Amino acid sequence: MEKAFTITAQDSHSSARKGKINTPHGTIETPAFVPVASQGTVKGLAHDQLKKLGAQLILVNSYHLYLRPGIKTIAKFGGIHSFISWEKPILSDSGGFQVYSLSPLVKVRKKGVEFTSHLDGTKIVLSPEDIIDIQKNIGSDIIMTLDYFLPFPASEEKTKEAVELTTHWAQRCKRHFLENESSQLLWSISQGGIFWQQRKKSIEDLMEIDFDGYALGGLGIGEPKSQFMEIVEKASTLLPRDKPRYLMGIGYIQDILEAVSRGIDLFDCVLPTRNARNGTLFTSQGRIVIKNKKYENDPSPLDEGCSCYTCQNFSRAYLRHLYERGEISSAILNTIHNLYFYLDIFRKIRQAIQSNSYQQFICSIIDKKEED
Amino acid sequence: MEKAFTITAQDSHSSARKGKINTPHGTIETPAFVPVASQGTVKGLAHDQLKKLGAQLILVNSYHLYLRPGIKTIAKFGGIHSFISWEKPILSDSGGFQVYSLSPLVKVRKKGVEFTSHLDGTKIVLSPEDIIDIQKNIGSDIIMTLDYFLPFPASEEKTKEAVELTTHWAQRCKRHFLENESSQLLWSISQGGIFWQQRKKSIEDLMEIDFDGYALGGLGIGEPKSQFMEIVEKASTLLPRDKPRYLMGIGYIQDILEAVSRGIDLFDCVLPTRNARNGTLFTSQGRIVIKNKKYENDPSPLDEGCSCYTCQNFSRAYLRHLYERGEISSAILNTIHNLYFYLDIFRKIRQAIQSNSYQQFICSIIDKKEED
């Protein structure tokens, strides 16, 4: 059997590496960006548009899909690929993020997580085993263990508890996962916030259980940038070289570039798609807030150097007009641009690592006007 | 110079005819359906999707574009084609429909129409000459005269007044249009409701002024179907054979089929696009309201026989899921299907006329479950 992860190039001036993740639905070239498709669709796009942009995989949300349309419906279709008609790789998150994002509605117990449904108030108890069963039914290529994601700031004591519970759940996830044969890849998520001792313990625990890939969770939620990057750097050093590393929920280009140089392989974030719908566009010269009056008569594309459908065809003035009118095509064209911008940067990152010029590539980007 | 309209086939069992309208931005094969793009975009689609569906032209709204982004902006781009990056034919309506649809905000005087802006309450006076200037600046291929569109029911006396004013405005539009050379086509709109004497007078007045095409306005707003079709039939008989005939705002397939057999060449309606966004889909077997629970696990496409992207790729269950989640891709995929359904029927209408089998074609459609 082909290895699940192969490193195909290594930058000699940093820990940046280029690789390939083999999944049941094809290969993902890393470093890779995963567009978020929580409900089984990237907001603002039909799949054909997304494929044209070069998306290699998408991320779906187990918790949301569990609630609606429900696992029964997805299972009737033989899994999420068939239900949503997307034949490329799919990663599902475990619902651990919802423990954080829906926290007033969540009780965390050793046996699992108790959600009060944000839809109708129903009490839902999900054990780590349930989380695996849900993702087995979803049939995503990469599935994640349940983790306990704390808000920032959290005390070291509370963080220690979260790490212990995350390890306990990861063990149960792994054990349950192994009960049936599966071609899915099981990745785990470390916690520990920015306390290195806790993060280290979390990663070591997970490495001992052994997973197909290792994610860093609970970062990028308000902690100082320098501490966050220090954790990423130390974590990467600790993690096995031959397994993919995933920095969850991180989307600022600057952070992505720094994390890649510290050896991170995979990223997901709603930033490009959500900002697109809000009319904030990323360009090589910085951000554009398209509703600004100064674009009213501006005939130039969003980004002169960009090859996306939006930039090849439409002016800022027209994009402003569509945004101001609340047209659906505003969301479509903006999402096409922002996702192209992200996916294109990742293509360039991979090329730069391949040609051992990643540092020059970072400088070429950082010299330009940077987003905040 | 090539003729603006050529009849290429004539059904021998009805008045249905196939033709070609030549415009500065290309030829329109008739009978044709014009997707509505009031603000310069068909709601729910980017232009590339619309072109793939086979749209030959679009309809933009002079009144809305006049307000926003404003004629200055469009003129700076050298016209609407360049502003919105749509290189195929464009038809602009005159704003006459807004006299009807925004009626509480409108005062009709001989000199023109006084709108209280629905945006900020500003008073806007638009003369027939202004309406021509606006459309000259917009640079659409087919421009329409200003008409006085009454609600239904209206008295015959009021209708007579509306016809007189419509004629007066049409004369002024034509005179003003001729003041500068233009490759645009100027079409007029008759009024008269369902009073044949008034409609006849309106059409005769407009024919005397002489236009490149003739639209029937003020129909399809609640009047009995039989009277409406009688007017269409008589009007077509009265209108010159060698000029295109346009039945404005009519969108039910049944009505379209009957109007084509009475000699109508052009139709526009928001029905397929608006219904798509509301989750009502047209199929060869009748309408589908996609939110219905019965589609929850339905793996079949909207329409087994349909070749559109949506039907070729997605199940009713997934489309229901997207609709229920309020996803933008629901509007996209539904709009693709409904517009394909319409444009495909028009392709078949043209083929049927070409092969002199239009009556059989109508029967083949009407035998199936019909929409209301």
Image: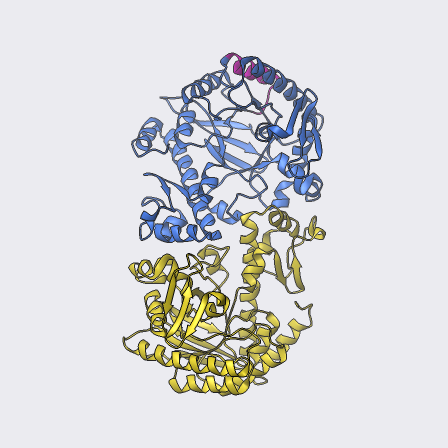
Chain colours: A blue, B yellow
Residue A216 vertical position relative to residue B167 in the rendered view, above or below: above
**Whole-percent x and y of residue B326?**
58, 47
Residue A89 vertical position relative to residue A265 in the rendered view, above or below: below
**Whole-percent x and y of residue B200?**
50, 86
Left or right of A83, for residue A33: left
**Whole-percent x and y of residue B220?**
56, 73
Residue B216 vertical position relative to residue B53 in the rendered view, above or below: below
Q: Is residue A222 magenta?
A: no
Question: Relative to the observer, which residue lies in front, A155 or A95?
Answer: A155
Quarter of the rendering occupied by the C terminus of chain B? bottom right
- Taking the image as drawn, is residue B48 in sight? yes
- Which residue lies most toward the left here? B180
Q: Is residue A199 magenta?
A: yes
Query: Taken as a whole, is the magenta stretch helix, strand or loop?
Result: helix
Task: Report the label total.
Answer: 0
Question: Relative to the observer, which residue lies in front, A10 or A53?
Answer: A53
**Whole-percent x and y of residue B241?**
47, 85
Identify the magenta region: A197-213
Tell me the quarter of the picture where residue A94 sits. Answer: top right
Tell me the quarter of the picture where residue B240 sits. Answer: bottom left
- Taking the image as drawn, is residue B85 in sight? no
Quarter of the rendering occupied by the N terminus of chain B? bottom left
Residue sitting at x 31%, y 29%: A363
